[in-house]
Amino acid sequence: MTAGEEHVLLRTEGRAAHITLNRPRALNALTHAMVRRIDEALAAWESDPAVETVITTGAGGRGLCAGGDIRSIYEDARAGGTASYGFWRDEYRLNARIARYPKPYVAVMDGIVMGGGVGLSAHGSVRIVTERSRIAMPETGIGFAPDVGGAHLLALAPGELGTHLALTGTQIGADDALLCGLADHFVPSDDLPRLLAGLATQPVGDALRPYVGQPSPGELAGDRAWIDDCYGADTVEEIVVRLRGHGSAAARATADTLAGRSPTALKVTLAAMRRARRLGSLERVLEQDYRSCCAALASHDLAEGIRAQVIDKDRSPLWKPATLAEVTDTEVARYFAPPAGEEFRLAATPRQA
């Protein structure tokens, strides 16, 4: 395999080490091999005194990472397999490593950043967005619940903004990402080359200072009132009732959005968000994610959702159960029980940087 064919490119430049995701035709979607390579690099650089900063970017100019390689997950689900278990275990260990990394971890969230891409970036200590950033956890649209610690991140957003983003999968830009705590700094995309060059010779704060700006206003701040009111309900059914009955046209449109999502995924996602607030640490939420993902792998909706959105692209998934009323509490609880013989644990340690 030549360097051009490698899906993760590693290099050092001055005081900085660089990770470049290199599957541009797949929007840098993560494979299991990519997760392992990134984790190995981070482990090595952690003890390398020559490396003071780690920078993660995506090749191709369209985004950092569109998520995990869901085609592989689809094939596994259709075959009734469990190969995806290993991918998720290693991915979540990587997410936890990034969150606790003892050196500045600079994630350049330029372009599309979704699902597993959020796990690679939003747990970092220095998260940069641009005017091109489009960030989302779109899992309910494929019969899945947000994973990679997404519920932990979104549960920390102001009010019920995180619940709204988790249930709808809405894409947000730079200003809304800053508002929700998914990013730290806005840098115009034209300034990224100079910023990255500066990180080779300067501490992160010094390199960033000349380029940090103010993004264009987002939408969530103006929608906060109806979002907090509607998503404060205890059930998805009541959330939908409140959205449909609200005076805001945006709220009513959101009810239509939820109507197209997997009913099971919506109920599991709301439960995961509420539980994340109680669990507290990222590690406990990642353990919860592992349980819900393993349950989803054996479900009808995950394979059907990927088929409709990615494989056949007919955008017409046939969810089973088809309505919220048919999704029982017992079925939702199944997503939070460990799979037989597959319990997953992570040690929780504070960030050292």
Image: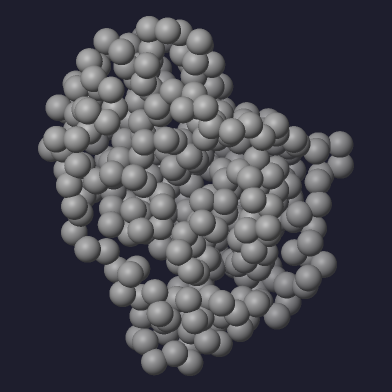
Q: Is residue 88 above or below residue 246?
A: above
Residue at 45% x, 76% y is 227
- Left or right: 324, with 344 as reference point: left
Horizontal and vertical percent for residue 322?
65, 74
Q: Position of 322 compared to 15: left or right?
A: right
In the image, residue 318 sits, relative to residue 65, either above or below, namely below
Out of 103 and 37, give the one closest to the viewer.
103
Relative to 275, is 46 on the left or the right?
A: left
Q: Residue at x 60, y 56 (%)?
A: 145
**Residue 277 located left or right of residue 192:** right
Residue 111 location, quadrant: top left
Residue 177 spot, x, y in % from top left: 35, 54
- Residue at 29 percent of width and 68 percent of height: 219
Image quarter where the N terminus lies is top left
Kindly identify the residue that appears in the image at 48 percent across and 47 percent down.
Answer: 115
Q: Nearer the viewer, residue 73 or 202?
A: 202
Asked where in the image residue 40 lies, by quadrant, the reply is: top right
User: Could one spot residue 289 in this view of the protein?
Assistant: no
